[in-house]
Amino acid sequence: MTTPFDRLPAVPALTVTSTDVVDGGDFAPAQYSGLFGVPGGEDRSPQLQWTGAPETAKSFVVSVYDPEAPTPSGFWHWMVVDIPAGTSELPSGITELPGNAWTVKNDARAAQFIGSAPPAGAVDHYAISVQALDIASVTELGIDAEATPAFVSFNILSHVVARGVITAIGRQ
């Protein structure tokens, strides 16, 4: 399975795992979107754990992106930035982020996880990524709370020192 990151410059790999979704497996009902009207959806972020960060990592960025959403640009469901370097896990449904981490507004312009909500009959593949950065905060790049996930992704590209991606499937 290819990911949206495959066409970006290669960096060392992080190992990403989750107790909520197996790489290549379906999202659980909790990771579907109640806000977007999916029955049983809870908009609960998945548990994530990562290993293999290089010593140069000063922070992490976690994101969930659906490149197959019915838009020309896909759909960003979640992005958390400035996760401290000593962190290696986010629990399911996280509400209190570690250190100075903060949530970038997603494509629904909400600073929270928005679960899977593909159109009826569709099967979408969600890239769940953890990227290690050589900077402690994206604010060093002039990024603030009004930035979009795409803008953050563009600006951090030269600061990514490792990346791990798992893919989740959403279907209706």
Image (cartoon, rainbow, N blue to C red):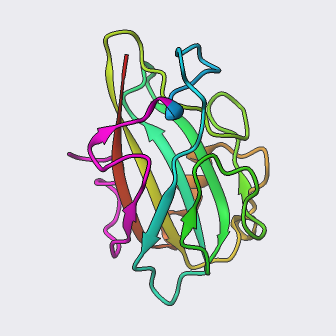
Q: For the view shown, which residue lies furthest in the top direction?
A: 120
Number of numbered tags placed on the structure image: 0
Q: Would you place residue 4 above or below residue 116 in this image?
A: below
Most frequent secondary structure within the magenta stretch: loop
Q: For the view shown, which residue lies furthest in the left direction?
A: 1
Query: x, y percentage for residue 39?
Result: 53, 14
Quarter of the picture containing the C terminus is: top left
Query: x, y percentage for residue 3?
Result: 30, 47
Magenta stretch containing residue 40, yes or no? Answer: no
Residue at coordinates 65% horizontally, 20% vertically from top-left?
Answer: 35
Compare residues 42 and 51 and report the one nearer the observer. Answer: 42
> Bounds of the magenta span?
1-29
Q: Is residue 136 left or right of residue 29?
A: right
Q: For the view shown, which residue lies furthest in the bottom direction?
A: 55
Residue at coordinates 44% horizontally, 55% vertically from top-left?
Answer: 129
Q: Would you place residue 30 above or below residue 161 in this image?
A: above
Compare residues 11 and 158 and report the one nearer the observer. Answer: 11
Q: Would you place residue 11 above or below residue 36 in this image?
A: below
Asked which quadrant contains residue 133, the reply is bottom right
Asked which quadrant contains residue 50, the reply is bottom left
Query: x, y percentage for residue 124?
Result: 34, 28
Residue at coordinates 50% horizontally, 90% vertically from top-left?
Answer: 55
Residue at coordinates 38% horizontally, 9% vertically from top-left?
Answer: 120
Quarter of the picture containing the N terminus is: top left
